[in-house]
Amino acid sequence: MALRPCPATALVLTAFLLGGWTCGVAQETSDTSRHLTLSEAIKQAQANEPIFAAALAAQKSARIDGYLAKASLLPSVTYHNQVIYTQPNGQTNQGGQAGTQAAPVFIANNAVREYASQAVINETIGLRQFANAEVSSANAARATAELEIARRGLMSAVVSLYYMVSTTREKARIQAEAFAEAKRFTELTQKRETAREIAHADVVKAQLQMQQKQRDLSDADIAADKARLELGVLLYPDPRVPYTTDPPGAAPMLPTREEFNQLASKNNPEIRSALASVIAANAGVKSAKAAYLPDLGLNFTYGIDAPQFAKNGPDGVRNLGYSMSGTLDIPVWDWLSTQKRVKQSEIQRDVAKVNLTATQRRLIATLEESYAEAAAARDQLDLLDQSVRTAEESLRLTKLRYAAGESTALEVVDAQNSYLGVETAHADGLVRFESALAALQLLTGSL
């Protein structure tokens, strides 16, 4: 009797194999930690992020559509070959090339045997074809702008995650120092209690502070691991690959608001995308109205269409030759379908115009908000630097006063918390400024 594998067993085996493979990857990469620059992170994210890949594919497809629409304006060339045999009906008729010939059963056919070998050139001239080519060109421009929007959005996410990795790591270091400081203070209070210099309440307060800092350190380590994994998802097949990032550098000087306004007005993909949509909508209206006009069809055929597959037939009759035709199709009545299509395209055009004006307003507001955010973050960095130095000095003086018996344990704990708070705020301030600066650079296309 054949044995069928149990589904649960198959799942366990699959999990074991996958777990062994991923553990192997982690084992191979855990020995060395690579350093990752911001430009490398952006490049790898562009190769792995599915939304950006979809935008890139849409842009390439739109470019091909534009090529196909323009190619449809040119004549098409076909080399046509055909052999037709029709049963004779027992009678004869006058042959098109020479004398009499057997008459075919089907009156639509020219002869019992008919050979066609012709080069056929067709061309259709109409306003609709030109309007459709214009629509395709505008759609290609819009897809290019949408690709740039996707690229900038991806870069914004990568920049935020990149500096978040270094910031959470810095916060974990700060929490480790805070825990070590709380532990040293706890040991100091225990020694002073043994020497009967302080009450047991100071020891309890110091122990509570140390325990809280130990929990905060654990949370900071988890936050650092989460940030590293979130960025790793965008960069590596195995997000557990260890890597390090550059910390935020010194805050540069911001260019003037006028410089940013000029750059944003010249190089903004949202505006280009909305403008391309308006152009495509206008061309769509033109294409719909083109249905009211006639189309001119031209045909040129060169080759043979004769009872013999030969250049010349019997008695030197020439089989090889050409024919030309012109067709003008004039629309007369289509039950108002064209009128409805024109109305539909005009509605879409009006929506595209509203979207363009809304995009322009949003750009102005976003630029103002981003510049104000970057300027505020840049100004606050100096204040945060001063606060760190002040809190550090306050903690040092408070510890000296406590050692001399001139302050309480509560004052020391407050000084420790103040120093920890301003250090954490300083780390957050660096990320805030880098993110705001990156947002401005993305708006102006300089990143």
Image (tube, rainbow, N blue to C red):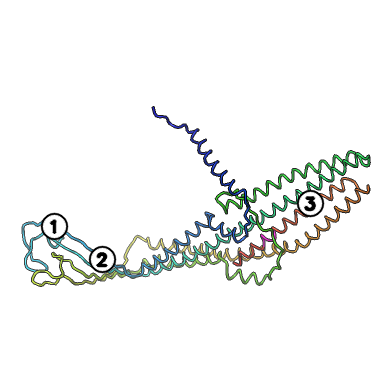
Q: Which mark is residue 86?
A: 1
Sort mark 1 into few (<14), some (14-19) or many (20+) by Cα contacts within 10 Å: some
Left or right of residue 83, residue 63 in this image: right
- The picture places residue 415, in percent across and down from the top left corner, at 84, 50
Left or right of residue 166, residue 304 in this image: left
Q: Nearer the viewer, mark 3 or mark 1?
A: 3
Left or right of residue 177, residue 121 in this image: left
C-beta proximity under 8 Å, tags 1 and 2: no
What stretch of residues is rendered in magenta? 432-436
**What residue sits 48% from the left and 62% below the top?**
59
Secondary structure beneath dot 2 equals strand
Q: Which residue is disc 2 drawn over?
A: 79
Answer yes or no: is residue 201 visible.
Answer: yes
Amino acid type indicated by mark 3: Leu
Quadrant for residue 183, please give it: top right
| Above or below: residue 86 compared with residue 15 | below
| Above or below: residue 5 compared with residue 275 | above
- The picture places residue 408, in percent across and down from the top left corner, at 90, 46
Amino acid type indicated by mark 1: Thr
Q: Foreground residue, 229 or 332?
A: 229
| Above or below: residue 341 compared with residue 174 | below
Q: Which residue is disc 3 drawn over?
A: 420
- The picture places residue 380, in percent across and down from the top left corner, at 75, 61
Sequence-first disc among 3 and 1: 1
Sequence-first disc among 1 and 2: 2
Q: Which mark is residue 382?
A: none
**What residue sits 74% from the left and 51% below the top?**
173
Sequence-first disc among 2 and 3: 2
Quadrant of the rendering where the N terminus is positioned: top left
Quadrant for residue 444, please give it: bottom right
